Amino acid sequence: MLDAGEAKTVLRINRGFAEDLDGGRTALAQLLLDGSDSNTASIILGYAARIAADFNRSLIEQRFAKSAGLRLEADPVALAWRAWFNPNLESRNFFVPGVLAMLVAVVSIILSSMAIVREREIGTMEQIMVTPIGRLEFILGKTIPFALIGFLDVALITVIAVFWFQVPLLGNPLFLFLGTGLYLLSTLGVGLYISTVSTTQQQAMMTAFFFMLPAFMLSGFVYPIANMPKVVQWFTYLNPLRYYLVIIRGVFLKGLGLAVLWPQLLALAILGATMLLLAAGRFRKTMA
């Protein structure tokens, strides 16, 4: 459950817990945390420590009430904690992969949003329409260079994250690039659609930023999605950044692969194909 992100923490009660409490001995329990989200893990750890302290205090009050003058040398319950995937709860292990996803989105969406509108603004769209280049070839010619730039950004930032910021890369880098490719399908599709509905480059840039700001806020990078209102949580399923963050953190910190992350890959593939089809359909109307 921690690997798949279905739970943020697991409370493990050791064998003989109740017998130790009844016998006046210290009972042991362990709290396992998903350290890939260091902020949430720290908050959970604070709540758990407070709950354990309240539980110990209530037990001590009960024992003093039963046996006057009883002296306790240790707390009734000893709660130990361990953070998986990020033992020291380093914040950089949480933020650096998120910054990678944000930079790829910014670069790919902004560049692709300028692709078609620039041709229309400088007056070369009519020249392209009379050439033997088809619509598919034109779209591929506008997206492949930006996709290569996106892959180059991922490679560069990954090297910086691993060797400069000391963020562990436990998974397969090839799987990271697979997820990046599907992620770029979505972001480039969004950028191309913006380019087809815009009339000037300034309008395309403003529309791109108008899309990116809510996408960042609803990705789970700033605020946990589980804490958002239910209506807002439904909108996050349309956000490709939500799925890509799970992929890159799973690859970097958990060493996960296709067996666990296939739902995120499938969601990115569906979103990417949908956005590219919408952009192609809009571009067909523009050329007509």
Image (cartoon, helix red, strand yellow):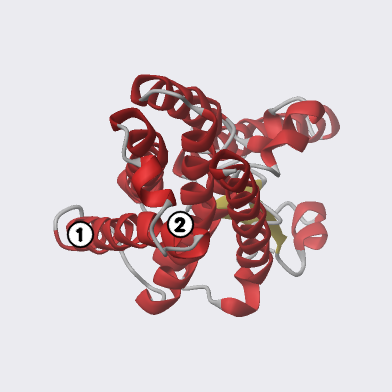
The amino acid sitting under disc 1 is Leu
Asked if residue 122 lies left or right of residue 228, the reply is: left
The amino acid sitting under disc 2 is Ile
The answer to whether 150 is drawn above or below residue 123 in the figure is: below
The answer to whether 277 is drawn above or below residue 254 in the figure is: above
Residue 37 visible within the image: yes
Asked if residue 218 lies left or right of residue 204, the reply is: right
Asked if residue 184 lies left or right of residue 272, the reply is: left
Sooner in the amino-acid sequence: mark 1 or mark 2: 2
Spot occupied by residue 172 in the image (x, y as percentages of width and height): 40, 78
Spot occupied by residue 39 in the image (x, y as percentages of width and height): 47, 37
The residue at the point 38 percent across, 58 percent down is: 131
Query: Which image quarter is the N terminus in?
Result: bottom right
Query: Which image quarter is the C terminus in?
Result: top right
In the picture, the disc for residue 146 is none
Q: Nearer the viewer, residue 212 or 164?
A: 212
Residue found at the far right of this picture: 66
The residue identified by callout 1 is 156
Asked if residue 128 lies left or right of residue 210, the reply is: left
Q: CA distance from mark 1 to mark 2?
A: 26 Å
Residue 85 visible within the image: no
Question: Dot 1: what SS?
Answer: helix
The residue at the point 82 percent across, 58 percent down is: 18
Q: Nearer the viewer, residue 146 or 31?
A: 146
The residue identified by callout 2 is 139
Spot occupied by residue 9 in the image (x, y as percentages of width and height): 64, 51
